[in-house]
Image (spheres, grey):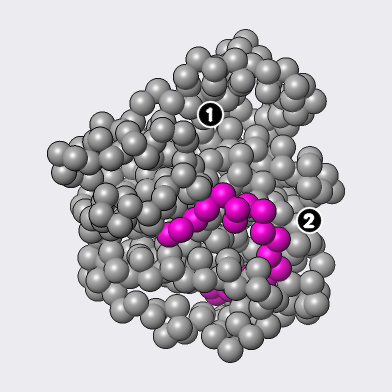
Amino acid sequence: MKKLAIISEFNPFHNGHKYLIDKAKEITEADVSISLMSGDFVQRGEASLIDKYSRADVALDNAFDLVIEMPNFISLQSAEFFSHKSIELLNKLKIDYLAFGIEHINSEKFLEISDKIINNNGKLEELTKHYLNNKHSFTQARYLALKSFLGGNDFISSNNILALEYMRSISKINPNIKPIPIRRIGANNQDLDIKDEKFASSTSIRRNLSGEIKNLMPYSSYQKLQDFQKNYKQANKEKLFDIFKYKLMIEESPIRDSLCYEEGLDNYFRDLLKDNPSYDEFIDLAVSRRNTKARINRLILNYILNNEKCLNEIDFDFIKVLAFNENTTSVFKEIKGDLQIVIRKSDLVKLSRNDLIIYENMLRASKLYSLLIDRKLNSDFTRNITIKKTYEAN
């Protein structure tokens, strides 16, 4: 049984995502398609546009067989850790293929350049360290190091750098996993505006929710988005910011062990907060050459959720299932004994102490998201998991 995986956010699921999974299945002829999907908070350090269960249902409607939740301490990290911890988990599922999107270049060229970079990792690390010493953030330092190493920036985009980190993680964890890079069509990952009738980035769709976006998404995705917006408020970032201010300024909980923390940020944040700025004002003031907007956003969430650096050292052995179809039965049988499968609350009795630490971390994030959208706080235990018959293409 051949297993294909895609690491995803689907925020929201659009035609580009549908193209990626369909093309990957065509290339690999895999028997089972798995999505490791971010939960209610995504890598930019923001709340997702619609909740994880709605996005998982849409993924099942559009060629996936199994959707599992990525622990938020993984999704709220930089590309390097995000990719490494994701591949670690997928390797426990014994995947055969990892498919992902790339930009600007074809698959063969991407693989060629990636191999060159990975085989010269010492040189790249030396260049990265040089730029870090010049007060650049890690993301910027890595960008400048790659640009210097490659002699240009045709390869470099946030999408391709994440794809490169997947390649690097595969080479370290299990080189037998076959990477399937697939060039995006119609739109690039960072496009802010809608330029095509059928394809647009998730970013441009989120920026144009009141516009004509119906044709940019599969029907089920558009319908889920409409239903969610009708039933729930958009995540309230000022409410999130109030929690952050209370914890840092009044409760004075330590922030130094939080994921994404860098020396001196606690005192810097407290100075900025003395004037009681709004969330957006605070972010604008906090961003610097060394600390990007995404990093500040991730740090705020990691701090609120008690996501500390020690979580990276925990080896957990379970998956939290968000949706699946009958085709997944063979996967569950294969991993039984190696990974615990959490579908309902009663499954928690099977988890180890380390597993429970990670699960409770995921549950905190779900409750925080509920608080921000004015939803009942126990939705993880009251929301029925979607189980469908095997996917059939239209």
Q: Is residue 274 left or right of residue 304?
A: left
Residue at the image point whose x is 60% and y is 53% from the top:
310
Examine the rendered structure and indicate whether residue 323 appears above or below residue 255: below
Q: Is residue 179 left or right of residue 196?
A: right
Magenta stretch: includes residue 330 = no
Task: Identify residue type, mark 2.
Answer: Asp
Image location of residue 296, percent across then percent down? 38, 40
Given residues 89 and 334, the one toward you in this image is: 89
Q: Is residue 73 left or right of residue 241?
A: right
Query: In the current view of this chain or complex, which residue is farthest to the bottom?
Result: 346
Residue at the image point whose x is 74% and y is 25% from the top:
121
The reply to whether dot 2 and dot 1 touch (C-beta < 8 Å) is no
| Magenta stretch in the rendered image | 305-323
Q: Judging from the image, what secondary structure is the residue with disc 1 in?
A: helix
Image location of residue 232, percent across then percent down? 25, 70
Image quadrant holding the C terminus, namely bottom right
Image quadrant holding the N terminus, namely bottom right
Are there few (<14), some (14-19), or many (20+) residues within 10 Å of tag 1? some
Residue at numbered disc 1: 138
Are there few (<14), some (14-19), or many (20+) residues within 10 Å of tag 2? some
Specify the quadrant of the image occupied by residue 267. Answer: top left
Residue at the image point whose x is 64% and y is 16% from the top:
127
Image location of residue 84, percent across then percent down? 67, 46
Residue at the image point whose x is 51% and y is 66% from the top:
361
Residue at numbered disc 2: 96
Task: Identify residue type, mark 1.
Answer: Phe
Q: Earlier in the sequence, mark 2 or mark 1?
A: 2
Image location of residue 192, percent across then percent down? 33, 36
